[in-house]
Structure formats: structure tokens, C-alpha cells
Image: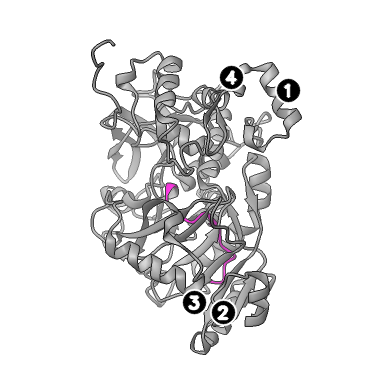
Amino acid sequence: MTKYLRSKTENKNFDVIIIGAGIVGSMIARFLSRYKLDILLIEKEADVCMGTTAANTAIIHAGYDPLPGTLKAEMNILGNRMWNTVAGELNIPFERRGDYVVAIGKKELPHLDELFQRGVKNGVPGMMLISGDEVRKREPDINPDVSGALWAETGGITDPFAANFAACENAVMNGVTLLLETAFEAFVIDGKRIVGIKTNKGTFGTRWIVNAAGLYSDDVMHKAGIRPEFKITPRKGEYYVFDSADISVNNVLFPVPTVISKGIMVTTTVHGNTIIGPNAESIQDKEDTSVTEEGLTEVWRGAVKLVPKLNLRYAISLFAGLRAEGNARCKNQNVNYSHDYVIEIPAEIQGLVNLGGIESPGLASSPAIAQRIVGLLKDAGEKLEEKSDWNPIRPARPRFRDLSKEEQKILIHNDPEYGRIVCRCENVTEGEIVAEIHSPIPARTYDAIKRRTWLGTGRCQGAFDTPRVVGILSRELGLPPEQISKKGPGSEFLVGKTKKV
């Protein structure tokens, strides 16, 4: 029995409270759920995976990009190695397809050797420099001016939504308490020790706080009185998504990177869509996920430099995400890494595990970061006793479109709701929607269903399924249709009934 959304949590004491249920916070919760700890995971949004994790290119980076000697490089390499096991235990899509950094023209070619040498220093296995002719054989639609590429066989792709939900769900199944719409407000401090937190849902006592607040991690650490010089600057990245039926790129294609970004890439996904992006624009507003004409133009120009065959008429969606770019001097280094991770137990205050600046490759690094947090707690004297009944396996629920005809027939026989297609573009059934509404972390909004099932992501972008999903949510949750929302309070679809016909 899970402890999701326990009603009597206010003023309760926990061993560990984790702030933020993105991929990093959820992965930390899952790794810590292995031990005899009473853990609370709080998230200010109406669902998990609504921040940085919800808007990225879904790449498990090989590790040749971070600067050697940085914590980011270490976490990327260790995390990459863990993904086969993590994806298998959580039953989520993961394909180790490898990736390419593509040089266009002779001027870009020398940069590939620089990346190769960086990868060697970081310990990236399976790298190879290949010729332009070989790249053209492997990716027929590549720019014919390609002069060569760096190939890394350990690069992979996954579904970041599925990864986030599955990690969090496994944590909840192993006893973690999850509270949504619960925003951190302040610490309760006794002397030099944090003993609790104040939230909009009440005050909770604790022995340890883990700051996994992503874009807001600087605000959290500043309220603890540490790292006043550290600042998160949101870096906006904009994307196009293409209809899988009309455009299909076979590989993960990076351009030669710039000093601030890995560049605008063209990549396939585990769902078969092609995605292009992101650009990189530093902004001030941590909630601004709007797309702009200038940004999308930049993305388009960068993408067609790699794959000239791309055609905007097949674009079916636009979106933007914000990466948590951190700026802080690494105390153990003689150089200022403006893009390195902060993962520490600071000496200035007791009871805080502090994370900050977990930008790309945060998804790839997340299991290694979680493992590091376990090690930090052990080093701090926390006696972590393993549970005898801890279960690392998160069972997958049926995905109708992935089943054989015979399997579909059996599923429908056992539950007729799986025989009713709600989303025609992605073949998502009513049975799948109902299963997610009643899952260990219930999907209670349209976007929550969308992120879990891929419903509404095809060519019609939800035009066909939205009314039916609203009806199903209303029925299953026992709520009036007017209370069903897209992504939480303030985004309701309906305001009232029209006159009866």
C-alpha cells in the first residue's frame, strides 16, 4: 500500500524531505526509498515532471561534452552507465543508439578532434571519428557538405516523462510520501541546524532536506544562508516537433557545439518523432516558456544546416523549456566553472543536502546524482539500513499500440475499455487513460494523461480526444466537468453548461 497524498502529514516529522519532483528529485527519492527512512517528496506543481524535465531533447549523453575534471563530467559518465539497469527496472523506453557530432565544411572538422580528446579524458568508451562519406551512408538526409563526425556508441534516447514518472512511482510504491501543489516557503532553523520546512500546506519537521528545486534551487539555498554568490539564470531552449508519418531522421545528430550550448540538434525519439532544437537564450523570468519568432527562426536555420530536407509543413508542435544554468565558483578548483553542478552537504548549515545548476546532461546524470546523495548521507554519519522488502521493479502498464493483434484481443477481452480508441493519432485507449487515473501517482489533468500515455501528441494535437478525456477524468475522479483542467488550477477547460438542446 502506498502513502501517496497522506491526509495527516502536516506537522509530521520525516527523516528526509526532498524539494522538487523532477527527474533528479524523483530519482533521489527512489534511491533513498531503499532504506528505512520516512521520506517526503514535495512538488509545487499539480503533477510531477512539469519543470525542466518536461521540455528537453530526451538524450542520454555519452559524456564527451562536459569539461574534464568537473562534477558534471563525472556524473554524466557514471549516470550513462547506469541507464540500462535503471530503464530495465523501471520498464521505460531506452535505446542506446549512439550519437553523432557532425562537422559541416572543413572549418568545423578540427573541433571534432577536440571533443574526442575531451571524451577520452572523461573516460567515454566507444568513440570514433568517421569520414563525411561514412556519415552520408549512415544518414542519407544529412547535409552533403558534411566533412566528418564524432560517433559515440554509448549515447542514448529515452522518454523523459516516463523516466520521471516511473522513478517517482517506484519511490511511492516503496513508501515515499508525495505531496503535490506543495510549495516550499522557508526553513525552520534551530541554531545552525535545519529542523523543518514551512510550505503552503503546513510545516514539516525533518532531519535532512534535499534541495532538488531546479530553477529555484538558488532561492532555496539562499534561504538557508549559503552560497549567496550562486545564481540560477534560466536558459530558454525552443523546439519544433515533426509528424512521425512525414519526416523520419534515423539518428541523434548534434552540430559542433558552441561555448554556451551543445547547439541546435536534429534527433529522433523513442516515439518516432523528429525533434529539432534547442537554441539557448539566457532570460530572467523562471516561468517564461513562451516561444518566439526569433528563437524559432534560429532553431530552423540551425537544423536545416544539418538536414536540409526538413520541411516546416510537417511540424505539428512547438514548445520551449528552461534549463537551470548555474554560476558559482567551485571551491575545490582554481577555475570558475560557470556550468558545473553543485552537489554538497555545506559546512555552514547542518541538515541540508544542496544541489544546484543541474542543467544538461541532468537527465543522463540523474541516477548517478541520486547515488551520490546516498553516499553523502552515509559520509555524514547517517546510518542507512536497507529494507528487506524494497522492490526496484516498477511494473509497466499495457500500451495498446505496442501490442500484437493477439495481445490486443486478450486485453480487450479482459477489459473492454481497452477496445475504445480515444486518441486516434497515437492509438491510446480509454483503458490506458483509466489506468493512469488510478495509478500510484494518479493523473488528474489532461496534461498528466498526455505525459503518461502520449495521447494528444500526434498530428491533431488533441483536437479529437480532448472532450472525451475531460469526460473520462470527470467520471473517474467524481468531479464536475468544469473542474477538469489542462495542467492544474487556473487552466480549466469549461466554465459552465450551455442551454439544453
Return the x and y of residue 168 as percentages of the image width and height: 52, 37
Q: Is residue 55 magenta?
A: yes
The stretch in magenta equals: 54-65
- The residue at 57%/28% (across/down) is 173
Residue pictured at 64% horizontal, 46% vertical: 87
Amino acid type assigned to the residue bearing label 1 in the image: Ile
Q: Report crowding for label 3: few under 14, some 14 to 19, many 20 or more residues within 10 A (C-alpha).
A: many
Q: Disc 1 to disc 3, how far (Cα)?
A: 49 Å
| Eye-nearest disc, 2 or 4 | 2
Who comes first in sequence, dot 2 or dot 3? Answer: 2
- Give the camera-side residue of 225 and 272: 272
Q: Which mark is residue 256?
A: 3
Residue type (three-letter) at the residue carrying disc 3: Val
Residue at x-position 24% and y-position 54%? 285
Say whether residue 297 is left or right of residue 380. Answer: left
Q: Mark on residue 417?
A: 4
Q: Are marks 2 and 1 in contact (CB under 8 Å)?
A: no
